Amino acid sequence: MARMRAYGTRIGGSALVLALLLLLATGAAAAPKTTSFTPPLQLGYPEGDDWESDVAADGRGNVYVAWAHYGEVPGCDTCSSPAAIIQISRDGGRSWEAPKPLNPTPVRAIDDSYQIDLQVAVNAAGAVFVAYLDGKETVLQRSDDFGRSFSLPVIVNAGVKRSWTDKVGLAVQGEDVYVSYSIAQRFFVASSHDGGRTFSSVQLPDRSKDYGWTLTSGGVVDSKGAVYFSWVGVHQSGNALGPQDLFLTKSTDKGKTWSFLVIEKGVPPGPPCGEFYCGWDFWGPQIVVSVNERDHVFVAYNAGTEDQGPPAVWFRSSTDGGKSWSARTPIHTDWPSNAYHLYPAIEGGAGDAVYVAWMDNRMGGFNVWSRASQDGGKSWSKEVQVSAYVPGYDYKTEDGFAFTYGDYFGIAWDGRATVHLAWAEGPDYIGPGTVWYAHS
């Protein structure tokens, strides 16, 4: 989401989930043990402005956090502002290498629409993939040495008319790489079957007449190769006065054709954020998707029950590839509530595990919370507050941080026992803000 533009909705970005939901009062299994997290650690540069982070982990101890950095990049006179930045831990998140730009010589934007919207993912072999916006292009870079070096950017939207875009989704399985993107009401998925070296884009079935703006929020591939991406269709572009639809697109033929899975239709628009200076739909509905080892599909999304009313974060699941879905259930225990619950992040885990995280301002300021389920969402752990007060930051108090800095954040499960979270906090939509990290 470009900070100086009044556009956007996003969701949460890249994929791994920490979990949700009210324990059903009738015969539900015992709630799983609460997952605890390390104290938050600031990543990034000591000075600067870092926002909209995503995270991936490979189970070998490598953890990758990537984000957009505004302002000068130390040691890089040719870097853009914002710049795509990555920072890497080799020991499971205990210590971190210095942050570095992914591409020191990016395409230069000709106006203030320049943005990043970066997502990061790893495959089973440990290759690292990053997808982001570079001027009017959507690009992908790959690393085969655990992030020590990256390829030059490959243009994902080659052959598609260049225009200002918003949001990127990334899903990877082996050498199959999928990137979702949109150009206003038209939306696409680009597929690569050579590890991201070449791409072919498909415009998804024509529903552009239904929407004034369409925004992606991430994707996932299940064990059988089925690909899912999550989307928000905004009926009235440029204002938040109309209903919005939340849906998935699914492909079972490696991205050649796509079907639609409707999650919610006619969701009320989100609340404005007034004195925080954000864009018209910054707190609007957003949806994220993931799968677990059993190929059960999970979605989490924020949506209110009345026009511009306080949003809740809802959870739904499917055990049949999206043909049918459980009823939506709030993932947090303080609902109904006047608090704003925003920006879910979700990831499936081992067996039937699922992890979810989100932000809300129930304490006055905003905080990051998480829950976990080991039975596909039938029962949930207690809510755990992940963010915490750290002295020395003007936007932090004992009640939380002032503003949701960026409109998504990242969650990752390392394939073993650890869940990783990376998010950004700030004083308002303009910043400057900082990226934070914690792991279970």
Image (spheres, helix red, strand yellow):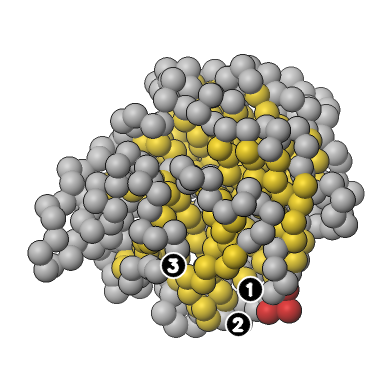
Is any part of residue 39 visible from this angle? no
**Residue nearest the viewer, comparing 221 with 363:** 221
Left/right placement of residue 327 relative to residue 117 reads left
- Depth check, mark 1 against mark 3: the one in front is 3
Q: Quadrant of the N terminus?
A: bottom right
Task: Please tell me which residue is depicted at 85% across the width and 39% down the height of the picture.
Answer: 107
Mark closer to the chain start, 1 or 3: 1
Relative image position of residue 155 (x, y in whole percent): 80, 41
Task: Please tell me which residue is depicted at 16% across the width and 51% down the height of the picture.
Answer: 31
**Residue nearest the viewer, comparing 208 with 419:** 208
**Type of residue at label 3?**
Lys
Mark on residue 242? 2
Mark closer to the chain start, 1 or 2: 1
* Pointer 3 residue: 323
Task: Please tell me which residue is depicted at 24% across the width and 47% down the height of the picture.
Answer: 374
Relative image position of residue 197 (x, y in whole percent): 75, 32
Q: Tag 3, which secondary structure?
A: loop
Mark closer to the chain start, 3 or 2: 2
Q: In which quarter of the image is the C terminus?
A: top left
Q: Could you tell me how far apart the alpha carbons at marks 1 and 3 are, in whole angstroms?
A: 24 Å
**Type of residue at label 1?**
Val
Q: How crowded is mark 3: few (under 14 residues within 10 Å), some or many (20 or more)?
A: few
Q: On screen, 362 above or below 12?
A: below
Mark on residue 234? 1
Task: Please tell me which residue is depicted at 45% across the width and 50% down the height of the picture.
Answer: 290
Q: Residues within 10 Å of mark 2 (few under 14, many from 20)?
A: some
Relative image position of residue 326 (x, y in whole percent): 33, 68
Q: Tag 2, which secondary structure?
A: loop
Is the Cβ of the residue at disc 1 closer than 8 Å to that at disc 2? Answer: yes
